[in-house]
Image: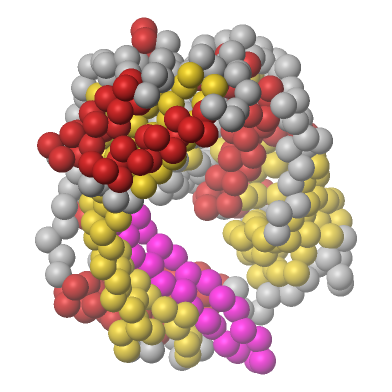
Amino acid sequence: MPALEAAVDQALARARARGADAAQAQVGLRVGYSVGVRGGDVETLEHERDRGLGVTVYFRGRKGGASTTDLRPEAIAAAVDGACDLAQHTEADPAAGLPEPDLMAWKALDLDLYHPWDMTPARAIERALAMEAAALAVDPRLQQSEGAGLQTGLGVSVLGNSLGFRGIRCGSSHGMGLGLIAQADGQMQREGWYESVRNPQHLPAPEAVGRRAAERALARLGARTLSTRRVPVLFAPEVARSLIRHLVGAVSGGALYRQMSFLQDKLGQQVMSPGLHLHEQPLLPQAMASAAFDGEGVATAASDLVRDGVLARYVLDSYSARRLGRQSTGNAGGVHNLIIEPTGHGGEAELVRMLDTGLWVTEVMGQGVNLVTGDYSRGAAGFWVEHGQVVHAVDEVTIAGNLKDMFRQILATGADLDARGSIHCGSILIESMTVAGSA
C-alpha cells in the first residue's frame, strides 16, 4: 500500500511541476489465479498479477491522459509527461475537470469487501473437477462438458487528485461455474451456471453448482420454435438484468447530452409502470458493486432512480453533469447495486403462474437494441408456458417491442433477486411482446 500511495503522490507532483492546474491519478494491483478443467483433465491454471497507473491532467480545460504498467519513478514521470503533452493538442472544454470538492468522499468507509480465500491451486482443481463430475453424473444425456472453472482474486487501488483527495479500495472476488452440453434425439443444447461472491464462505458447494447447471441443460432438451404471435413475456432474473441495463444506458449522461436516448427529457415523468421502485444502494456490505466513492472520488449514497414508475434522477459523472447543467450523481464508472424492488408477487414459480400462457425467456442473443429509438429485437430461448405450467423448451425465436412500451407494461417484478452484478434484479413480467418464430 505505501508503494501504491507513493506512486499516486509522485504522479500528482509531476503534473503540478509541469504546470497542470488539476490532475487525478489512480493505481491498482490485482493478484489471483483461475483454474479450468474439462472432461476430467486440467486445461488451464493461470496466475494473475496485474498492476497499472492511469493519470489525467487538465490545463485550463485542456485534458490529457496516459497510463503505464511500470511503476518505477522514471516510468511514472514519462506517463505524466505524455499526458501533459497530449493536453496541449486538445481543445479546451469548460465541462472538463475534477469533481466539485464538496462532493468528494472525504470520509473513509469500510464496506467489508475484502475476504481472502485460503484456497490452493491443487484444492481449486479438486473443486472444479468435483463440480464437473457432479454435473455429468445427473443424467446420461449429459455426455459432454464445455469446461468447469474456479477463480479467486484480490485487488487494491488508490485514487488521488490535486484537491487533496485520497481514496483506497480493497476488494475480493471469487467464483465458480461450468457449461454443459445435453444430447437427446439428435438435438444438442448448451446451458450452464456460475456463482460470484465477495466472501468465499457464501459460495455453494461445487457439487450444488454442477447439479444446477445440469438441471438447466436438461430442461433445454426438446426445444422447438413457435409461430409468430403476441403474448406476455417473462424474463428470468439473469436476462431481466439486461432490460434494466438498457434503462440505465438511456438515462446516463453520455447518451443524454449527445441527445441519443429514447428517454431524453423524461426526468420527473412516468417511464415505468406505477408501483415500480428502482433504488441504488452503494454501501451494502459485501455486495459485488459496493463502493464508498465512484471512479472520480465522488461520494456515493443511497438514492432512488425510479420512484413509483417516475424517473427520479439521471446517472451522471462530473463531465456529463456539467454538460447538462446538473450535479454528479456519483456514477462515474456505472451504478452501484441498483436494486429493483419486488412488487409483492413472489419469486420465479409465482410469476410463471402469473404469466399463465406465454413465453418464459431464459436467454437472449444478439445486439438488436437501439437506445435512440427504444426499438428492441433480440434472439431468445426459454420455455413455452400454458396455464401456468411449462409445456416445452423454446429456441430460435425473436422477441420484439419498444423499450418505452415494455417498461410501462411491466406487470410484476419477482423476489428472486440475482445479486451477482451491479444490478440486483428478479424476474420481470411484461404484459405483451411480439414473438416471431419460423413454425
Image side of residue 40 versus residue 215, left or right: left
Instruction: Check the image and tell me how it is coloured.
Output: secondary structure
Q: Is residue 170 above or below residue 214?
A: above
Give the prevailing secondary structure in the magenta stretch: strand
Q: Residue at x 65, y 58 (%)?
A: 364
Image side of residue 336 versus residue 406, left or right: left
Name the quadrant containing residue 111: top left
Q: Residue at x 48, y 33 (%)?
A: 85
Pick the front one: 82 or 52? 82
**Which segment did they paint magenta?**
174-196
Whether residue 290 is visible to the viewer of this picture, yes or no, is no
Q: Is residue 255 above or below residue 244?
A: above
Whether residue 356 is visible to the viewer of this picture, yes or no, is yes
Q: Residue at x 38, y 40 (%)?
A: 79
Q: Is residue 321 magenta?
A: no
Q: Position of residue 148 (x, y in %)?
A: 37, 75
Name the quadrant containing residue 67: top left
Q: Is residue 13 above or below residue 67?
A: above
Pick the front one: 212 or 253? 253
Image side of residue 382 versus residue 169, left or right: right
Q: Which quadrant of the rendered structure holds the C terminus?
A: bottom right
Q: How many discs mark residues in the rendered view?
A: 0
Q: Position of residue 382 (x, y in %)?
A: 64, 63
Pick the front one: 78 or 39? 78
Q: Residue at x 70, y 42 (%)?
A: 430
Q: Which quadrant of the rendered structure holds the N terminus?
A: top left
Name the quadrant containing residue 113: top left
Q: Position of residue 83 (x, y in %)?
A: 45, 34
Image side of residue 62 versus residue 160, left or right: right
Q: Position of residue 96 (x, y in %)?
A: 54, 19
